[in-house]
Image: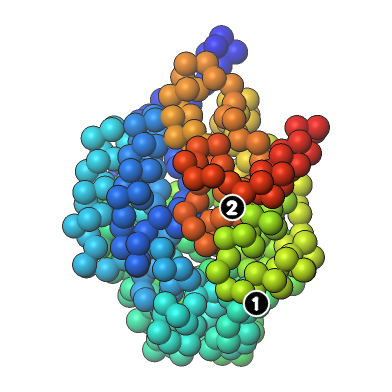
Amino acid sequence: MEKYSGSILFTPGKIGPLTIRNRTIRSAAFENMATNNNPSKMLADYHTSVAAGGVGMTTVAYASVTQSGLSFADQLWLRPEITADLRKMTDSIHKEGAAASIQIGHCGNMSHREFTKCIPVSASTGFNLYSPTFHRKLKESEMIEMARSFGNGVRLAREAGFDCVEVHAGHGYLISQFLSPYTNRRRDQYGGPLKNRMKFMQMCMNEVMEAAGSDMAIVAKTNMRDGFKGGNGIEEGLEIARELKALGVHGLVLSGGFVSKAPMYVMRGAMPIKTLTHYMNIWWLKYGVKMAGKFMIPTVPFEEAYFLEDALKFREAIPDFPLIYVGGLVSRESIEKVLDHGFEFVQMGRALLNNPSFVNDLKQGTERCNCGHSNYCIGRMYTTNMACHQHLQEEIPDKLKREIAALEAKWAKK
């Protein structure tokens, strides 16, 4: 423990008006634990367990601000009818001493017509193979209403007892679709140069900050780079980050990638194709992914703190401002490395799925979580609740056990 004697990990930290008991945040990794777009006992129990496990703040993911932004039946849709149930969850989180955050956003061209009851919308008209679905571009009047929905989401979050709202402006969701030249091909004032592509983000954040007032912490998840040719690079990412700061956000979550273009750039490692297709319930998609999944979803090697090299560029360019690091933190050593570089907070997803008490265990001297990096949790996340294979009560088919063992053995050799 002596080697961490100067650590800030277990000291309080501030994000805007909010003080968090330590520097750890459960990232807004999609749980797929809602029921018919409503909060469930499973969702509340999971976040309560993370709070009891010592985390500073836990983030509920990802709540759509309108019905038109839904991709899954078990994704939250933030609306007045569910605030009472959300309040029960935040009360439970608070009783364990943690702060509660909720990520708000809109899936844009990754929305599913089955749940939206309308044609999915985006920055531009086109076809998204990921969903798969045709989508149409938003009209300016609709953009104004959409931005107001983001502000309304913050008001509902306050009613539900949340201390913080994380606005999802990355990963190829709606705000990100306007920001990226890959998805924004508009020829009006909202397309073309980056200053135009940021206008929708500015509209949304102005509504968010007005709704936040002086008592809600607001952070934004933003791409440092989109992660592929034809998307935004580091320079554009820095300009977007500076603009978010100027718009008044209290902190930035530094991430990267497009889940509809290269999902493993976001999450790293290999997508377990057998696991992914085993849980799929659309027969033609199941067989298509079985045949071409390895080509559709290429592996991006996992390494601890995999976004740190990019994040350091942001730390240098945006001093004296809360930056939240996310990506590949599964050990005390990697967490301390990030904090030593001047990041105020760290977010973790898979580590806290593998062990909700990971933060308390770190206090007791545990050096790393027991995640084997098979990405089983990610493979099942798109169809059923996100869960670590090590803690399932259900029996896993032998073919999936073999896939998990092979992927974990490959990681163990590194």
Residue 15 lies left or right of residue 337; in this view the side is left
Quarter of the image containing the C terminus? top right
Q: Say whether residue 298 is visible.
A: yes
Q: Earlier in the sequence, mark 2 or mark 1?
A: 1
Q: Is residue 27 above or below residue 245?
A: above
Q: Residue furthest top?
A: 2
Q: Is residue 143 above or below residue 2?
A: below
Query: Which quarter of the picture shows residue 179?
Result: bottom right
Q: Where residue 373 appears, x then y in whole percent? A: 66, 41
The foreground one among 217 and 291 is: 291
Q: Where residue 89 appears, x then y in whole percent? A: 26, 48
- At mark 1, the secondary structure is helix
Labels 2 and 1 touching (C-beta < 8 A): no
Residue name at image x 64 percent, y 62 percent: 277
The foreground one among 169 and 353 is: 353
Residue name at image x 37 percent, y 76 percent: 67
Q: Where residue 383 appears, x then y in whole percent? A: 52, 62
Give the residue type at disc 1. Answer: Trp
Residue name at image x 76 percent, y 42 percent: 406
Residue under circle 2? 378
- At mark 2, the secondary structure is helix
In the image, which is nearer the foreground, mark 2 or mark 1?
Answer: 1
The foreground one among 396 and 324 is: 396
Q: Residues within 10 Å of mark 2 (few under 14, many from 20)?
A: many
Residue name at image x 70 percent, y 58 percent: 273
Residue under circle 1? 284
Give the residue type at disc 2. Answer: Ile
Q: Is residue 239 above or below residue 325?
A: below
Q: Where residue 395 appears, x then y in whole percent? A: 54, 44
Residue 265 lies left or right of residue 71; in this view the side is right
